[in-house]
Image: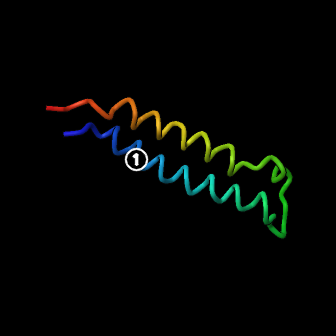
Amino acid sequence: MKPIWYFVGMLLTAIGAVIVSTGIYYVFVPPDHITVLGNTNPNLWWGAVILVSGILFVLVNKNKIVE
């Protein structure tokens, strides 16, 4: 059996990929309304953080076996 953190990493990777792709979309097609900090592209930053942490969870727990 795989540890629960392996599956948490898979979920974080999937969610991070969706958020990063949304951020990339907003770079090329800016929204109609821009907030005060909208120019900092928070979707890209937080999506990248979530994506990297998810990949780390998967890689660290890939070969661990829980008995």
Q: Position of residue 61 (x, y in %)?
A: 33, 32
Q: Report whether 30 appears left or right of 8.
A: right
Image height check: is 64 above or below 50?
above
> Identity of the amino acid at label 1?
Met
**Residue at figure coordinates x 47%, y 46% from the top left:** 12
Q: Report whether 46 appears left or right of 38.
A: left
Residue to which mark 1 is pinned: 10
**Residue at figure coordinates x 47%, y 40% from the top left:** 54
Q: Quadrant of the N terminus?
A: top left
Q: Quadrant of the C terminus?
A: top left
Q: Report whether 62 appears left or right of 15.
A: left
Give the farthest residue toward the left. 67
Image height check: is 38 above or below 54?
below
Q: Position of residue 36 (x, y in %)?
A: 86, 52
Image height check: is 1 above or below 34?
above
**Residue at figure coordinates x 34%, y 45% from the top left:** 7
**Residue at figure coordinates x 47%, y 53% from the top left:** 14
Q: How is the image coloured?
A: rainbow
The 10 Å Cα crowd at callout 1, few under 14, some 14 to 19, many 20 or more, is: some
Give the farthest residue toward the bottom. 32
| Res 45 → quadrant | top right
**Element class at badge 1:** helix
Count of labels in the image: 1
Q: Position of residue 34 (x, y in %)?
A: 84, 61
